[in-house]
């Protein structure tokens, strides 16, 4: 038998088909292209995001125009009303209320009796003082007659000069004791007169705090006024005016009052006096006005709104209250320069009108200031100007 010839061996390094290589090169190129495109897209997105962040980091502000001040300014301030004269009548003597004759709202004359106090202890003291005075008078009469007799005896040399001087000295002592007893009685009788509580001036009774039988006076557990009396023919009006306006308020200046009870009525008043000091806590000074009150419409202790017509400040500007920044450097407003940078201006405030503030220096009418500026706004900060606001 013949053996079969062995098959030829296949080489391990048989080359790949040509089409497969081309396909691989194309896939690699596509992958590289996709990666490159993605990298470029991400770079563009990052650049766009950075540009957007930079643009939005610049705050946008709105400007409002500064107006010129008026020739006259209206000043409205709260005020308190007080009576022309007012008194709280405390009992001067201890005792029990015997009666009262005038209640709140009663019109009384000067010196008219309002109430009577029973004073049993004081009455007893008066009785003792009268007895002491009678005793002192008796001793004084005896000493006087004794001194007269001893003076007669001296003429006949029956007694010595020393004895006569002693009798005259005893008379002087007894005379002084009479004066002392009379003064003590007079003091107690004067105290007794306070048992009738009287009106110190003509007016109206505004309070009555005692009932019949109440213990009143220094001996009472709690001291309280028995009556209150007020003279309301004229009313004193007290207003706290800002220090910046101290030069514009003068005695004789006219004003108008409005009270809640009569909203449609205006009461005339006249400045009567100015305090000579500024309250360090409020920064204001006190002004007193007088208002006639013939019909009693104005009530002491009440509230009123006082209206002044003040002359305007020359060169003053009106700035919206919302445009003012208050910080450690004081009041400031912000403007924007031609390069979009913030410029801070320190201002001197005059009259505060609520929505607007009168500015005496630091800004001029016609300028544009930043409205509603954020507290973080600073000098030289770059901003974007939005649509202007109407002042």
Image (cartoon, helix red, strand yellow):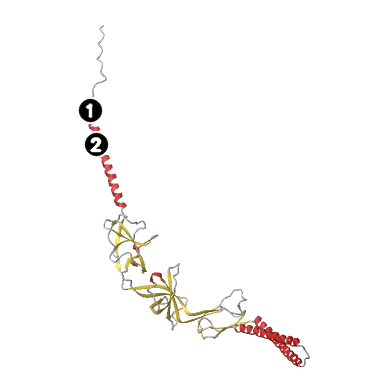
Q: Which residue is mark 1?
A: 21
Q: Can you say whether 175 is above or below 15 in the image?
A: below
- Residue closest to the eye, 127 or 293: 127
Say whether residue 37 is left or right of residue 275. left
Q: Nearer the viewer, mark 2 or mark 1?
A: 2
The residue furthest right is: 158
Q: Quadrant of the N terminus?
A: top left
At x 43%, y 72%, the residue is: 285
At x 21%, y 26%, the residue is: 18
Task: State the separation of the CA atoms marked 2 and 1.
Answer: 18 Å
Residue 13 falls in image quadrant: top left
- Residue 266 lies, in percent from the top left, at 38, 79
Say whether residue 268 is left or right of residue 14. right
Q: Can you say whether 201 is above or below 327 in the image?
A: below
Q: Which residue is mark 2?
A: 33
- Residue closest to the eye, 75 or 34: 75
- Secondary structure at badge 2 equals helix
- Secondary structure at badge 1 equals helix
């Amino acid at each position: 038998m013949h053996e079969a010839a062995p098959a030829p061996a296949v080489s391990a390094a048989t080359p790949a088909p040509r089409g497969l290589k081309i396909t691989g090169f194309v896939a690699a190129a596509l992958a590289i292209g996709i990666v490159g495109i993605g990298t470029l897209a991400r770079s563009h997105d990052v650049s766009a995001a950075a540009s957007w962040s930079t643009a939005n980091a610049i705050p946008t502000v709105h400007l409002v125009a500064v107006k010129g001040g008026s020739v006259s300014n209206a000043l409205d301030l709260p005020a308190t009303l007080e009576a022309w004269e007012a008194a709280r009548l405390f009992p001067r003597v201890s005792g029990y209320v015997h009666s009262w004759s005038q209640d709140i709202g009663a019109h009384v004359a000067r010196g008219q009796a309002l109430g009577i106090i029973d004073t049993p202890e004081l009455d007893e003291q008066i009785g003792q003082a009268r007895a002491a005075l009678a005793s002192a008078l008796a001793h004084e009469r005896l000493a006087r007659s004794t001194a007269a007799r001893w003076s007669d005896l001296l003429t006949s040399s029956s007694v010595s000069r020393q004895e006569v001087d002693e009798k005259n000295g005893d008379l002087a002592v007894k005379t002084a004791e009479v004066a002392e007893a009379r003064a003590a009685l007079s003091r107690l009788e004067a105290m007794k007169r306070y048992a009738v509580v009287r009106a110190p001036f003509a007016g109206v009774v505004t309070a009555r705090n005692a009932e019949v039988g109440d213990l009143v006076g220094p001996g009472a557990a709690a001291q309280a006024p028995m009556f209150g009396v007020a003279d309301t023919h004229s009313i004193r009006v007290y207003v706290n005016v800002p220090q910046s306006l101290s030069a514009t308020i003068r005695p004789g200046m006219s004003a108008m009052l409005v009270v809640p009870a009569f909203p449609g009525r205006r009461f005339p008043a006249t400045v009567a006096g100015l305090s000579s000091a500024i309250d360090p806590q409020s920064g204001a000074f006190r002004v007193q006005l007088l208002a006639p009150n013939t019909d009693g419409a104005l009530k002491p202790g009440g509230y009123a709104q006082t209206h002044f017509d003040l002359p305007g400040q020359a060169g003053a500007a009106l700035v919206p209250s919302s445009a003012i920044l208050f910080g450690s450097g004081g009041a400031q407003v912000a403007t924007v320069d031609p390069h979009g940078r913030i410029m801070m201006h320190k201002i001197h405030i005059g009259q505060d009108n609520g929505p607007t503030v009168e500015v005496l220096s630091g800004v001029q009418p016609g300028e544009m200031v930043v409205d509603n500026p954020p507290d973080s706004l600073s000098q030289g900060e770059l901003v974007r100007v939005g649509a202007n606001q109407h002042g």
